[in-house]
Image (spheres, rainbow, N blue to C red):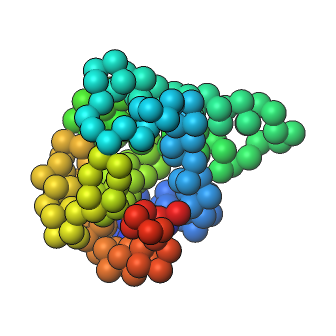
């Protein structure tokens, strides 16, 4: 939400990112990893590096999540805007600006904006949070890693918005993070 509001100041996104869209994005974003319910715990919680076979299984979570949300949409009596956005995010939040992501290998503007926003927010949260396979990184180190991926993993326009929104993001994280530093 905070990142999307900062991005709204960019001329390319100002018209699209109105309050209604940002609100729907905020409702949708928490579902980005819903497909992980279909991934075995021994892979999800593995403290070390995944094998190529385990990584192939882990990567299916994007399609699993998108398909689950599509089923929820089909079961709904009428269209639910946030589910449509959640489906886009679930499928596209691991795509990369340079086309090297998954599941579809989308590149640049082919990646839905919602997926690009959540991808950046998700990586920032992961870097700043303790995980079974890594400690929490400092804000400075996390930003260095993210900035190094601008134009490869991330849309460069989002980097400007992230820098503008970072103080507010860190304030929110301090209030709402769980004991591992992850936003709940």
Residue at x-position 57% and y-position 48%: 31
Q: For this view, does 156 lie left or right of residue 106?
A: left
Viewer-proximal residue among 164 and 67: 67
Q: Is residue 91 left or right of residue 68?
A: left
Residue found at x 41% / y 32%: 43
What residue is at 42 percent from the left and 41 percent from the top?
45
| Left or right: 131 as drawn, with respect to 74 | left
Can residue 88 be spotted in the picture? no
Visible in this render: residue 72? yes
The location of residue 52, given as percent across then percent down, is 28, 21
Q: Nearer the viewer, residue 111 or 54?
A: 54
Q: Residue 32, percent across and down?
A: 52, 45
* Residue 54 in picture, x, y percent from top left: 36, 24
In the image, residue 30 above or below residue 48: below
Please tell me which residue is depicted at 34% across the width and 61% down the height of the picture. 129
Instruction: Note whether 18 is above or below 105 in the view shown.
Output: below
Q: Is residue 8 above or below residue 71?
A: below
């Amino acid at each position: 939400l905070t990142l999307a509001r900062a991005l709204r100041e960019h001329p390319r996104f100002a018209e699209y990112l109105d309050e209604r869209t940002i609100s729907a994005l905020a409702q949708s974003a928490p579902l980005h990893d819903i497909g992980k319910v279909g991934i075995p715990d021994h892979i999800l919680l593995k403290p070390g590096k995944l094998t190529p076979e385990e990584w192939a299984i882990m990567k299916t979570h994007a399609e699993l999540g998108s398909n689950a949300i599509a089923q929820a949409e089909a079961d709904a009596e009428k269209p639910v805007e946030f589910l449509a956005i959640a489906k886009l995010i679930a499928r596209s939040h691991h795509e990369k600006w340079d086309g090297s992501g998954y599941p579809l290998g989308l590149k640049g503007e082919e990646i839905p904006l919602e997926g690009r926003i959540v991808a950046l927010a998700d990586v920032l949260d992961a870097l700043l949070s303790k995980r079974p396979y890594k400690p929490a990184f400092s804000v400075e180190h996390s930003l260095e890693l993210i900035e190094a991926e601008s134009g490869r993993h991330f849309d460069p326009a989002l980097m400007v918005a992230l820098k503008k929104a970072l103080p507010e993001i860190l304030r929110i994280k301090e209030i709402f993070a769980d004991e591992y530093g992850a936003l709940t």
